[in-house]
Amino acid sequence: MTGVKISISLTNQTWPDGPTGLRDNLIAIAEAADRAGVDTLWVPDHLLQADPTVAAEATDMLEAYTTLGFLAARTARIKLGTMVTAVTFRPPALMIKAVTSLDVLSGGRAWLGIGAGYHGEEADRMGLPMPPVAERFERLEETIELALQMWRGEESAFEGKHYGLSRPVGRPLPISAPHPPILIGGDGERRTLRLVAEYAAACNLFDIPDGGQTVRRKLTVLAQHCADLGRPFEEIEKTLATRLTPGETSDDLVHRVEAQAALGFDHVAMVMSQAWTPETIDILGTAIPRLRELQPRRQPPEQGPGAEPAACATDRSPSRDPDRRRWQR
């Protein structure tokens, strides 16, 4: 694969005409993105506005999978997913069934975007579970294992530390082959990036304005985890969440993505502090043909002279079954 993909995240769902116009605005944005060649339309999986740098807390926030199902019926090509679902916010079989249903109804366009979760205030206000972080990571891995089992059509008992299901049923099976791709959100070096290397089709890192120093380190850590597991680093899609700033042109965007591709990113997920409009989608659409011509770096980024090695990645816990290549299941 060559080129850089571009996608959008609907982090701000408040348009000037309020809730009565929300449906029509969502349709307009989704259809414009579908026509423009945007790769994926992401919806944040929150019940309230979780990012005060994007929009005020009082802004609207729709339930994610209901929204994605609605948008699947209004689009033909664009992929659809959450960025990302907190693993403890739904029973795992229910969440897996939602993703499978989205994949079937969209004709094979669903992602499973998932993470350990982080927003304790949201969980407290909305009555959602938020166990300690170590337990959330255990639940994250068990949920991914359960998803893979259900997507294989296996109806045997699932017994984990936190989840026990007597006979999970995955039918209808997903259309995506072998299953919807898995994106694991977050940049934690010991657990998150290890799980990416072990299970995921894609990671999702954050565009921090430090000249690429942080994301370069994160990609180096990910490469070390891949080497430990015997997985080719280059087969993981490196996704970067970054902002489209007010006044930014298509030329500005292409110039910025060129630098991100040189670091190794082959997919940029754009967010905005305002709600998306067809005009801002046009900025992306104008840039897309040029982004497809870029050649992202495939190898791990080089560390500059004097850079500290990513030593934390070598603190590796052995897999329960090191011979199973989970990313190939």
Image (spheres, grey):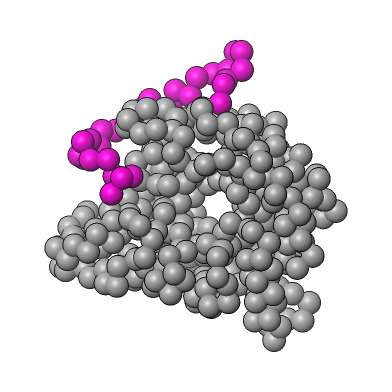
Residue that appears at 45% across and 59% down:
111
The total of numbered circles placed on residues is 0
Q: Residue furthest right?
A: 247
x then y, percent, for residue 206:
60, 44
User: In the drawing, does residue 268 fall left or right of residue 85?
Assistant: right
Residue 219 makes an appearance in the image: yes
Quick check: 98 above or below 121? below
**Rendered view: 118 above or below 320:** below
Q: Is 255 situated left or right of 224 in this image?
A: right
The image shows residue 230 at horizontal and vertical percentages of: 32, 30
Give, as a single range, the part of the protein colored magenta. 301-329
In the image shown, does 315 or 177 lie closer to the viewer? 177
Query: Where is residue 22 shown, x and y percent of the image?
Result: 67, 80
Which of these two is toward me, 185 or 311?
Answer: 185
Q: Residue at x 82, y 50 (%)?
A: 249
Along the line of sight, which residue is nearer the eye, 133 or 279? 279
Q: Was residue 124 drawn as part of the magenta stretch in this picture? A: no
- View extreme (top): residue: 305
Give coordinates of residue 112: x percent, y percent: 43, 59
> Is 325 placed above or below 229 here?
below
Residue found 58% across the figure and 56% down from its top:
39
Chief secondary structure of the magenta span? loop
Residue plotted at (61% across, 13% down): 305
Foreground residue among 179 and 92: 179
Q: Is residue 129 visible?
A: no
317 magenta-colored: yes
